[in-house]
Image: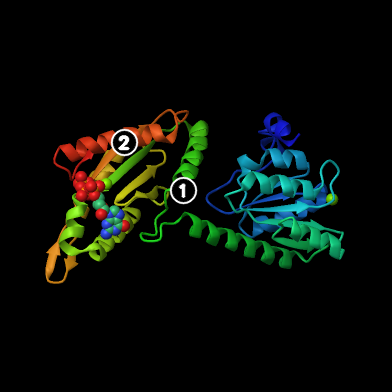
Amino acid sequence: LFQLCYEHQIGDVASNEQGAKKGDEPTVLLIDDDPSFLMYVKEHLEQSGWYVVAIADPIKAVASFYDVRPDCVVIDIHMQTKTGFEVLTFLKEKLRQQFVPMIMVSIDDRKETRMKSYEMGADDFIPKPFAIDEFIVRIRRQLERKKLIDELLLLDELTHVYNRKYLKQAYEQLKSDWHRTHEPFCLAVLDLDHFKRVNDQYGHLIGDVVLKQFAQFVKTNVRARDIVIRFGGEEFVVLLPATEASEAFLVFERLREQFERIPFQSGETTFSCTFSTGIAEVNDPSKPIGYWIELADSALYKAKNTGRNCVVL
Ligand code: GH3
Ligand code: MG
Ligand code: MG
Ligand code: MG
Protein backbone atom coordinates (compact mmCIF):
# COMPACT_ATOMS: atom_id res chain seq x y z
CA LEU A 1 0.00 0.00 0.00
CA PHE A 2 2.75 2.42 0.93
CA GLN A 3 4.61 1.65 -2.26
CA LEU A 4 1.52 2.47 -4.26
CA CYS A 5 1.04 5.72 -2.44
CA TYR A 6 4.66 6.61 -2.93
CA GLU A 7 4.34 6.38 -6.67
CA HIS A 8 1.11 8.30 -6.90
CA GLN A 9 1.61 11.06 -4.44
CA ILE A 10 5.16 12.12 -5.03
CA GLY A 11 5.41 15.87 -5.32
CA ASP A 12 2.58 16.50 -2.90
CA VAL A 13 4.98 18.16 -0.50
CA ALA A 14 5.27 21.12 -2.82
CA SER A 15 1.56 21.78 -2.56
CA ASN A 16 1.89 21.81 1.20
CA GLU A 17 3.16 25.41 1.31
CA GLN A 18 6.69 24.56 2.28
CA GLY A 19 9.26 27.32 1.93
CA ALA A 20 12.42 26.58 -0.01
CA LYS A 21 15.48 25.12 1.64
CA LYS A 22 18.16 27.81 1.79
CA GLY A 23 21.42 25.98 2.20
CA ASP A 24 22.64 22.93 4.03
CA GLU A 25 20.69 23.53 7.24
CA PRO A 26 19.39 20.27 8.78
CA THR A 27 15.94 19.14 7.66
CA VAL A 28 13.33 17.97 10.15
CA LEU A 29 10.23 16.10 8.95
CA LEU A 30 7.19 16.46 11.23
CA ILE A 31 4.35 13.96 10.83
CA ASP A 32 1.27 14.67 12.91
CA ASP A 33 -2.43 14.78 12.05
CA ASP A 34 -3.04 17.78 14.30
CA PRO A 35 -2.48 20.91 12.13
CA SER A 36 -2.28 23.35 15.04
CA PHE A 37 0.41 21.22 16.69
CA LEU A 38 2.29 21.10 13.38
CA MET A 39 2.17 24.87 12.91
CA TYR A 40 3.26 25.56 16.47
CA VAL A 41 6.22 23.18 16.39
CA LYS A 42 7.25 24.11 12.83
CA GLU A 43 7.50 27.77 13.77
CA HIS A 44 9.70 27.06 16.78
CA LEU A 45 11.96 24.62 14.98
CA GLU A 46 12.46 27.11 12.15
CA GLN A 47 13.55 29.66 14.72
CA SER A 48 16.29 27.19 15.65
CA GLY A 49 17.62 27.50 12.10
CA TRP A 50 16.31 24.20 10.78
CA TYR A 51 14.40 23.52 7.60
CA VAL A 52 11.07 22.00 8.58
CA VAL A 53 8.63 20.02 6.46
CA ALA A 54 5.32 19.48 8.26
CA ILE A 55 2.86 16.95 6.87
CA ALA A 56 -0.48 16.04 8.45
CA ASP A 57 -1.22 12.97 6.35
CA PRO A 58 1.08 10.07 7.27
CA ILE A 59 0.64 8.44 3.87
CA LYS A 60 1.77 11.60 2.11
CA ALA A 61 4.59 12.01 4.60
CA VAL A 62 5.92 8.56 3.82
CA ALA A 63 5.57 9.21 0.09
CA SER A 64 7.58 12.41 0.33
CA PHE A 65 10.41 10.88 2.32
CA TYR A 66 12.90 10.65 -0.56
CA ASP A 67 12.20 14.19 -1.74
CA VAL A 68 12.50 15.67 1.71
CA ARG A 69 15.64 13.73 2.73
CA PRO A 70 15.15 14.50 6.42
CA ASP A 71 17.95 14.46 8.98
CA CYS A 72 15.43 13.73 11.71
CA VAL A 73 11.80 12.59 11.71
CA VAL A 74 9.21 13.37 14.38
CA ILE A 75 6.23 10.98 14.28
CA ASP A 76 2.97 11.25 16.16
CA ILE A 77 1.73 7.84 17.29
CA HIS A 78 -2.03 8.33 17.07
CA MET A 79 -3.09 9.35 13.61
CA GLN A 80 -6.19 8.60 11.53
CA THR A 81 -5.00 6.78 8.41
CA LYS A 82 -1.78 5.13 9.64
CA THR A 83 -0.41 4.76 13.11
CA GLY A 84 2.97 6.28 13.93
CA PHE A 85 4.26 2.75 14.55
CA GLU A 86 3.39 1.77 10.97
CA VAL A 87 5.17 4.86 9.67
CA LEU A 88 8.20 4.08 11.85
CA THR A 89 8.37 0.47 10.65
CA PHE A 90 8.06 1.50 7.02
CA LEU A 91 10.77 4.17 7.23
CA LYS A 92 13.14 1.87 9.15
CA GLU A 93 12.80 -0.78 6.46
CA LYS A 94 13.40 1.73 3.67
CA LEU A 95 16.49 3.18 5.30
CA ARG A 96 18.67 0.12 5.93
CA GLN A 97 22.24 1.45 5.49
CA GLN A 98 21.41 5.04 6.35
CA PHE A 99 20.85 6.47 9.80
CA VAL A 100 17.98 8.93 10.29
CA PRO A 101 16.86 9.43 13.90
CA MET A 102 13.14 8.90 14.55
CA ILE A 103 11.40 10.57 17.46
CA MET A 104 7.97 9.40 18.56
CA VAL A 105 5.57 11.87 20.18
CA SER A 106 2.25 11.03 21.84
CA ILE A 107 -0.29 12.09 24.42
CA ASP A 108 -0.26 8.40 25.40
CA ASP A 109 2.57 8.31 27.91
CA ARG A 110 1.96 4.82 29.22
CA LYS A 111 5.02 2.70 29.85
CA GLU A 112 3.91 0.11 27.29
CA THR A 113 3.67 2.79 24.58
CA ARG A 114 7.13 4.11 25.39
CA MET A 115 8.53 0.56 25.49
CA LYS A 116 6.95 -0.29 22.15
CA SER A 117 8.46 2.86 20.58
CA TYR A 118 11.97 1.97 21.67
CA GLU A 119 11.58 -1.71 20.85
CA MET A 120 10.54 -0.76 17.32
CA GLY A 121 13.68 1.29 16.91
CA ALA A 122 12.66 4.84 17.82
CA ASP A 123 15.56 6.99 19.01
CA ASP A 124 13.50 8.96 21.50
CA PHE A 125 9.99 9.22 22.90
CA ILE A 126 8.59 12.60 23.92
CA PRO A 127 5.19 12.73 25.66
CA LYS A 128 2.72 15.48 24.70
CA PRO A 129 2.25 18.16 25.82
CA PHE A 130 5.91 19.11 26.13
CA ALA A 131 7.94 22.21 26.83
CA ILE A 132 9.10 23.44 23.43
CA ASP A 133 12.62 24.27 24.64
CA GLU A 134 13.14 20.72 25.90
CA PHE A 135 11.73 19.37 22.62
CA ILE A 136 14.24 21.51 20.67
CA VAL A 137 17.19 20.35 22.77
CA ARG A 138 16.25 16.72 22.23
CA ILE A 139 15.96 17.20 18.49
CA ARG A 140 19.28 19.04 18.41
CA ARG A 141 20.91 16.04 20.16
CA GLN A 142 19.52 13.70 17.50
CA LEU A 143 20.75 15.97 14.69
CA GLU A 144 24.23 15.96 16.26
CA ARG A 145 24.18 12.15 16.44
CA LYS A 146 23.11 12.00 12.81
CA LYS A 147 25.94 14.30 11.74
CA LEU A 148 28.53 12.32 13.69
CA ILE A 149 27.37 8.94 12.42
CA ASP A 150 27.28 10.19 8.83
CA GLU A 151 30.82 11.43 9.21
CA LEU A 152 32.01 8.15 10.71
CA LEU A 153 30.33 6.15 7.94
CA LEU A 154 31.30 8.32 5.01
CA LEU A 155 34.71 9.80 5.75
CA ASP A 156 37.98 8.20 4.72
CA GLU A 157 40.06 7.44 7.80
CA LEU A 158 43.44 8.40 6.36
CA THR A 159 42.64 11.56 4.40
CA HIS A 160 39.43 12.78 6.08
CA VAL A 161 37.74 13.47 2.79
CA TYR A 162 34.65 11.44 1.82
CA ASN A 163 35.09 7.76 1.07
CA ARG A 164 33.81 5.87 -1.92
CA LYS A 165 30.51 5.02 -0.21
CA TYR A 166 29.55 8.67 -0.42
CA LEU A 167 29.99 8.90 -4.20
CA LYS A 168 26.69 7.26 -5.10
CA GLN A 169 24.77 9.35 -2.61
CA ALA A 170 26.41 12.56 -3.87
CA TYR A 171 25.65 11.61 -7.48
CA GLU A 172 21.98 11.04 -6.63
CA GLN A 173 21.84 14.49 -5.05
CA LEU A 174 23.47 16.16 -8.07
CA LYS A 175 21.09 14.31 -10.36
CA SER A 176 18.06 15.69 -8.56
CA ASP A 177 19.61 19.19 -8.69
CA TRP A 178 20.12 18.71 -12.41
CA HIS A 179 16.44 17.92 -12.97
CA ARG A 180 15.65 21.30 -11.41
CA THR A 181 18.37 23.50 -12.93
CA HIS A 182 19.60 21.63 -16.03
CA GLU A 183 23.08 22.92 -15.28
CA PRO A 184 25.84 20.46 -16.19
CA PHE A 185 28.24 19.32 -13.50
CA CYS A 186 31.68 17.79 -13.73
CA LEU A 187 33.24 14.62 -12.44
CA ALA A 188 37.03 14.63 -12.29
CA VAL A 189 39.36 11.74 -11.50
CA LEU A 190 42.69 12.75 -9.96
CA ASP A 191 45.62 10.34 -9.66
CA LEU A 192 49.03 11.03 -8.15
CA ASP A 193 51.89 10.56 -10.61
CA HIS A 194 54.44 7.79 -10.03
CA PHE A 195 53.20 7.36 -6.51
CA LYS A 196 54.81 3.94 -6.31
CA ARG A 197 58.16 5.67 -6.55
CA VAL A 198 57.30 7.91 -3.58
CA ASN A 199 56.57 4.80 -1.50
CA ASP A 200 59.66 2.99 -2.80
CA GLN A 201 62.05 5.90 -2.24
CA TYR A 202 60.73 7.37 1.02
CA GLY A 203 58.59 4.61 2.54
CA HIS A 204 54.86 4.10 3.04
CA LEU A 205 54.58 6.47 5.99
CA ILE A 206 55.84 9.38 3.92
CA GLY A 207 53.53 8.17 1.14
CA ASP A 208 50.64 8.44 3.58
CA VAL A 209 51.66 11.98 4.51
CA VAL A 210 51.67 12.98 0.84
CA LEU A 211 48.23 11.40 0.37
CA LYS A 212 46.78 13.24 3.38
CA GLN A 213 48.26 16.55 2.33
CA PHE A 214 47.12 16.11 -1.25
CA ALA A 215 43.53 15.39 -0.17
CA GLN A 216 43.45 18.41 2.13
CA PHE A 217 45.12 20.56 -0.51
CA VAL A 218 42.40 19.69 -3.04
CA LYS A 219 39.63 20.15 -0.51
CA THR A 220 40.77 23.58 0.62
CA ASN A 221 41.39 24.83 -2.91
CA VAL A 222 38.03 24.00 -4.51
CA ARG A 223 34.70 25.64 -3.68
CA ALA A 224 32.94 24.61 -0.47
CA ARG A 225 30.15 22.96 -2.48
CA ASP A 226 32.55 20.80 -4.51
CA ILE A 227 32.80 17.25 -3.19
CA VAL A 228 36.14 15.51 -2.75
CA ILE A 229 36.11 11.71 -2.49
CA ARG A 230 38.95 9.23 -2.03
CA PHE A 231 38.03 6.71 -4.68
CA GLY A 232 40.86 4.24 -4.18
CA GLY A 233 44.51 4.17 -3.08
CA GLU A 234 45.93 7.38 -4.54
CA GLU A 235 42.97 8.18 -6.73
CA PHE A 236 40.36 10.83 -5.95
CA VAL A 237 37.07 11.87 -7.49
CA VAL A 238 35.94 15.49 -7.35
CA LEU A 239 32.34 16.44 -8.14
CA LEU A 240 31.83 20.05 -9.20
CA PRO A 241 28.17 21.12 -9.16
CA ALA A 242 26.97 23.65 -11.75
CA THR A 243 30.29 23.60 -13.60
CA GLU A 244 31.10 23.20 -17.29
CA ALA A 245 34.10 21.20 -18.49
CA SER A 246 36.02 24.33 -19.56
CA GLU A 247 35.60 25.82 -16.07
CA ALA A 248 36.64 22.57 -14.40
CA PHE A 249 39.70 22.48 -16.64
CA LEU A 250 40.80 25.87 -15.30
CA VAL A 251 40.19 24.78 -11.71
CA PHE A 252 42.44 21.72 -11.99
CA GLU A 253 45.03 23.52 -14.08
CA ARG A 254 45.35 26.02 -11.21
CA LEU A 255 45.58 23.20 -8.64
CA ARG A 256 48.14 21.40 -10.76
CA GLU A 257 50.42 24.47 -10.91
CA GLN A 258 50.10 25.05 -7.16
CA PHE A 259 50.62 21.46 -6.11
CA GLU A 260 53.82 20.81 -8.04
CA ARG A 261 55.46 23.65 -6.06
CA ILE A 262 54.63 22.20 -2.63
CA PRO A 263 57.77 20.76 -0.99
CA PHE A 264 57.58 17.44 0.87
CA GLN A 265 60.17 16.38 3.40
CA SER A 266 61.77 12.99 4.03
CA GLY A 267 64.65 13.32 6.45
CA GLU A 268 67.17 15.56 4.72
CA THR A 269 65.55 15.18 1.33
CA THR A 270 62.99 17.56 -0.14
CA PHE A 271 60.88 16.33 -3.01
CA SER A 272 57.82 17.38 -4.97
CA CYS A 273 54.83 15.50 -6.33
CA THR A 274 52.45 15.92 -9.23
CA PHE A 275 49.07 14.55 -10.22
CA SER A 276 47.09 14.02 -13.41
CA THR A 277 43.40 14.79 -13.97
CA GLY A 278 40.72 13.45 -16.30
CA ILE A 279 37.43 15.36 -16.55
CA ALA A 280 33.96 14.29 -17.66
CA GLU A 281 31.12 16.79 -18.04
CA VAL A 282 27.85 15.22 -16.88
CA ASN A 283 25.07 16.43 -19.16
CA ASP A 284 22.80 13.40 -19.07
CA PRO A 285 22.22 12.13 -15.54
CA SER A 286 20.05 9.26 -16.78
CA LYS A 287 23.36 7.46 -17.35
CA PRO A 288 24.77 5.60 -14.35
CA ILE A 289 27.70 7.03 -12.42
CA GLY A 290 29.96 4.29 -13.79
CA TYR A 291 29.60 5.73 -17.28
CA TRP A 292 31.03 9.09 -16.20
CA ILE A 293 33.79 7.54 -14.16
CA GLU A 294 34.87 5.54 -17.22
CA LEU A 295 34.77 8.68 -19.34
CA ALA A 296 36.88 10.61 -16.84
CA ASP A 297 39.17 7.60 -16.48
CA SER A 298 39.88 7.45 -20.19
CA ALA A 299 40.74 11.17 -20.11
CA LEU A 300 43.04 10.42 -17.16
CA TYR A 301 44.64 7.61 -19.16
CA LYS A 302 45.43 10.14 -21.91
CA ALA A 303 46.88 12.51 -19.33
CA LYS A 304 49.14 9.73 -18.07
CA ASN A 305 50.24 8.96 -21.62
CA THR A 306 51.03 12.55 -22.49
CA GLY A 307 53.65 13.01 -19.83
CA ARG A 308 51.53 13.19 -16.63
CA ASN A 309 51.15 16.40 -14.53
CA CYS A 310 48.38 17.62 -16.81
CA VAL A 311 44.60 17.94 -17.17
CA VAL A 312 42.64 16.28 -19.98
CA LEU A 313 38.96 16.81 -20.90
P1 GH3 B 1 50.95 6.55 -12.34
O1 GH3 B 1 51.61 7.86 -12.55
O2 GH3 B 1 50.80 5.80 -13.61
O3 GH3 B 1 49.64 6.69 -11.63
O4 GH3 B 1 51.92 5.70 -11.41
P2 GH3 B 1 51.65 5.18 -9.96
O5 GH3 B 1 52.90 4.60 -9.44
O6 GH3 B 1 51.04 6.25 -9.14
O7 GH3 B 1 50.52 4.14 -10.27
P3 GH3 B 1 49.92 2.88 -9.59
O8 GH3 B 1 48.43 3.05 -9.60
O9 GH3 B 1 50.45 1.69 -10.31
O10 GH3 B 1 50.44 2.86 -8.10
C1 GH3 B 1 49.74 3.45 -7.09
C2 GH3 B 1 50.48 3.20 -5.82
O11 GH3 B 1 49.85 3.86 -4.73
C3 GH3 B 1 50.52 1.75 -5.43
C4 GH3 B 1 50.26 1.71 -3.97
O12 GH3 B 1 51.30 1.12 -3.26
C5 GH3 B 1 50.16 3.16 -3.56
N1 GH3 B 1 49.13 3.37 -2.55
C6 GH3 B 1 47.82 3.10 -2.67
N2 GH3 B 1 47.19 3.40 -1.51
C7 GH3 B 1 48.12 3.85 -0.65
C8 GH3 B 1 48.08 4.29 0.71
O13 GH3 B 1 47.05 4.34 1.37
N3 GH3 B 1 49.26 4.69 1.27
C9 GH3 B 1 50.42 4.65 0.57
N4 GH3 B 1 51.53 5.08 1.17
N5 GH3 B 1 50.49 4.23 -0.70
C10 GH3 B 1 49.36 3.82 -1.31
MG1 MG C 1 -2.51 12.63 16.62
MG1 MG D 1 49.17 7.02 -9.66
MG1 MG E 1 46.34 4.87 -9.44
Residue 20 tag number: none
What amino acid is labelled 1 in the image?
Tyr
- Residue 214, visible in the rendered structure: no
Residue at position x 59%, y 62% in the image: 145
Q: How has the structure been colored for display? A: rainbow
Q: Is residue 135 visible?
A: yes
Q: Quadrant of the C terminus?
A: top left
Residue 61 or residue 200, whichever sits in front: 200
Instruction: Give the amino acid type for the residue marked by disc 2 in the picture.
Output: Ala
Residue found at x 24% / y 60%: 207
Examine the rendered structure and indicate whether residue 49 appears above or below residue 95.
Answer: below
Q: Viewed as shown, does residue 254 lie left or right of 56?
A: left
Determine crowd level at label 2: few under 14, some 14-19, many 20+ residues with C-alpha closer than 10 A.
many
Q: Secondary structure at mark 2?
A: helix
Q: Position of residue 125 (x, y in %)?
A: 76, 62
| Residue at x 58% of width, y 54% of height | 26
Q: Earlier in the sequence, mark 2 or mark 1?
A: 1
Q: Which residue is mark 2?
A: 296
Left or right: where does residue 58 sit relative to residue 22? Answer: right
Q: Secondary structure at mark 1?
A: helix
Within the image, what quadrant is residue 251 found in? top left
Quarter of the view holding residue 131: bottom right
- Mark 2–mark 1 Cα distance, whole angstroms, equals 18 Å
Q: Which residue position is annotated with label 1?
A: 166
Is 283 displayed left or right of 123 in the figure?
A: left
Determine which quarter of the picture holds residue 155. Answer: bottom left
- In percent of width and height, residue 118 lies at 75, 60
Q: Judge by depth and name the residue closer to the eye, 306 or 76.
A: 306
Q: Give the image location of residue 220, x and y in percent.
A: 34, 56
Q: Residue at x 78, y 44 (%)?
A: 56
